[in-house]
Amino acid sequence: MSDHLADFQKLIDVLESLLAPGGCEWDRKQTHQSLVPYLLEETHEVIEAIEKGDMNSLKEELGDLMLHVLFQAKLAETEGHFNISDSLKDISEKLIRRHPQVFNDDKNSSDNNLSWEQAKKKEKKRDSVLDGV
C-alpha cells in the first residue's frame, strides 16, 4: 500500500474511532445537516489559502476538508446509503467518461472530440446549483 493510501486509511480509522461507542460525543451527535456550516467554512478556508498562495495553509485546510468529506460519507454509510468507496468509484468512472480522448480505446471515436462541458451535458440533464459561478 502506498503512503497515500496508508495515510488515507489512518484518517478513516481515526474518524471511525471518534464515531464509535465510547468515541467523541460531539462527533457522534452530528448529522449531515449539522455539519454543513463547518463544511462550508472549510471550503472557504481552502479557497482563501489558494487565493493567498499559502501552501502551508492549503495543506492544512485540504486535510480539514477531507475530514468533512469522509465524515459525510461515514454518516451515509451508517445510514445504509453508500460508503466512501462508492463515491471514489463514481468519481473515477465519471473522470474516465468525461475524458474519452484519454481513456477511449477507439481513438477515432466522435466522443473523443467532446469537451468536458459537452460530455457533462450529454451525461446529465439537470443544472448545477453552481452553474454560472
Image (cartoon, grey):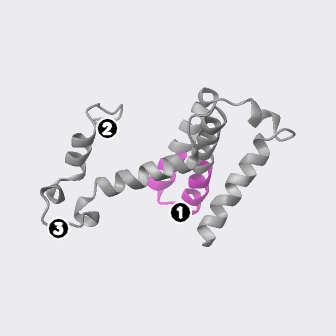
| Gap between marks 2 and 3 measured at Cα | 33 Å
Q: Amino acid at mark 3?
A: Lys
Instruction: Please state if 92 lies on the left or on the right of 133 as rendered.
Output: right
Pick whichever of labels 2 and 1 is earlier in the sequence: 1
Please name the residue shown 64% across and 28% down the image.
Answer: 34
Q: Residue furthest right?
A: 22
Please name the residue shown 58% across and 57% down the image.
Answer: 57
Pick whichever of labels 1 and 3 is earlier in the sequence: 1
Task: Report helix, strand or loop for mark 1.
Answer: helix
Residue identified by numbered label 1: 55
Q: Is residue 59 on the magenta stretch?
A: yes
Image height of 87 relative to 28, above or below: below
Query: For the N terminus, which image quadrant?
Result: bottom right
Residue identified by numbered label 3: 107
Query: For the C terminus, which image quadrant?
Result: top left
Q: Residues within 10 Å of mark 3 (few under 14, many from 20)?
A: few
Give residue 8's quadrant in the image. Answer: bottom right
Q: Is residue 117 on the magenta stretch?
A: no
* Mark 2 or 3, closer to the camera: 3
Please name the residue shown 57% across and 60% down the image.
Answer: 59
Magenta-highlighted residues: 45-64
